[in-house]
Every structure is written in C-alpha cells, then in structure tokens.
Amino acid sequence: MAIKKDYYFDSFVNMADYCCRASELLNSIIVNFKPDDLKNKMKEMHDIEHEADTVRHSMIQKLSREFITPIEREDIVGMADAIDSVTDTIEDVLMRLYMFNISSVRKHALNMSEIITKCCIALKEALAEFHNYKKFQDLHDLIILVNNLEDDGDSLFIEATRDLYVNCKDSIEILALDEIFHYLEICCDACEDVADIIESIMLKNS
C-alpha cells in the first residue's frame, strides 16, 4: 500500500498532540494538586506516553520499508525522537512529584507548567504547517514563539530556584523541589529542541 505524501508530517502533528495532552494533564495536576491522586494520575500520563510511542514505532516501521521520503530519513527519525522526548520529559516531572512525595507545589511550578503547555500548543501549530515548510515566515514566527517561551521558562527556573533556597528551611524539601524545577526546565528545553529541528530542516530544504 502506498504511503500518502503527508503521512510523516501528519504523524508529527499526531505525536505533538500527545505532547499537548501530557502538558495539559500535568498542568491540571499542579493546579488542583492532590498528593493522594498522583499514583492514579501517573497511570493516566503513562497511557498518553505509551500511545505516543505507538505512533512513533509505526512511523519508524513504515520508514524502514520506504525508498523515497519527503525529507531525509535521518531528519524524520530525529524529529520523531525529539517530539517523543517532550512527552517523556513531561511524564518525568509527574513521576518525580510522586517519588519525592511532594505534598504541595509552589506558584513557580504552576507558572512553568503553563509555559510548557503554551510551548506544546505552539509546536503542534508549527508542525501542522511543517508540510508547507517553504512558507518560511509562518513557521519562523512559531519557532520564535517557542524560543521566547523557553526563555521565559529559563527566567522562571532561575527565580524559582532562588526563591526556594532563600525561603525554604527544610533541606529535604529543597532537594526535592529543586529537582522538580530542574525537570520542568528540561521540558522547556525539549520543546525548543523540536523547534530547532524544524528550523534546521526548513533551511536544509529551502
């Protein structure tokens, strides 16, 4: 059976949708934080991550059987891995909330999770336009948006970490929340990595 021309681009969007679902779930967990619910929420998050993996595996299987692809094979794999990493890192945050037995979250964590959600939405919009990558300006604006959001995430990470070490007196809580903030920042970096790959492929094929 022939693979339709936009199969890979559609699959990228599909994978980005799982990033959005994961980020929205994490954000809702932090907004309505209930430590006793974390174990069940991890199952819900893992289901999202597993479904995203299924899309990626299917794409790679089809890629292994194709001779002609719309962009270079290495770029398809790199993009798929980068998008998958976003969902994985979001799941990592929730896992650490549970493992470290976090009893309450700080406002900075909520602000960072909101930025992650915005990044994922912008990435999905960018990937929805990616099949038409020769229209450089439309995609470029979305890439700049993701980069700006990542910068906001970096600033929040610095302020969150400083506030933690200045105002928290519990050393165990400091260690745990420091790790949480670090992984929230990694989520922002993962989103920027996808944007950078989009830009690289655009330049390579323009």
Image (spheres, helix red, strand yellow):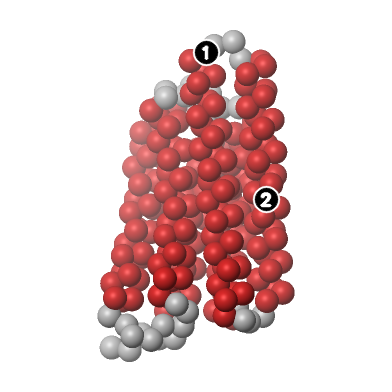
Q: In the rendered image, which residue does mark 1 sit on?
A: 171
- Give the crowd class for mark 1: few <14, some 14-19, many >=20 residues within 10 Å: few
Relative to residue 26, is residue 16 depicted above or below? below
Question: Which numbered circle lies on residue 195?
Answer: none
Percent across and percent down for residue 14 are 45, 67
- Mark 1 → mark 2, Cα distance in angstroms: 30 Å
Say which quarter of the image contains residue 185: top right
- In the image, 60: left or right of 92? left
- In the image, 40: left or right of 111? left
Percent across and percent down for residue 159 are 69, 30
Please name the amino acid that badge 2 sits on: Leu
In the rendered image, the residue lying farthest to the bottom is 2
Relative to residue 206, is residue 99 depicted above or below? above
Residue name at image x 61 percent, y 68 percent:
199
Please name the amino acid that badge 1 sits on: Ser
Percent across and percent down for residue 97 are 45, 30
Q: Could you say which is closer to the camera, residue 177 or residue 32?
A: 177
- Give the crowd class for mark 2: few <14, some 14-19, many >=20 residues within 10 Å: many
Residue name at image x 47 percent, y 58 percent:
82
Relative to residue 177, is residue 50 depicted above or below? below
Percent across and percent down for residue 170 are 54, 11
In the rendered image, the residue lying farthest to the front is 204
Residue name at image x 31 percent, y 65 percent:
57
Q: Earlier in the sequence, mark 1 or mark 2?
A: 2
Residue 166 in view:
yes
Q: In the rendered image, which residue does mark 2 sit on?
A: 149
Label 2 element class: helix
Q: Could you say which is closer to the camera, residue 87 or residue 47?
A: 87
Relative to residue 20, is residue 205 depicted above or below? below
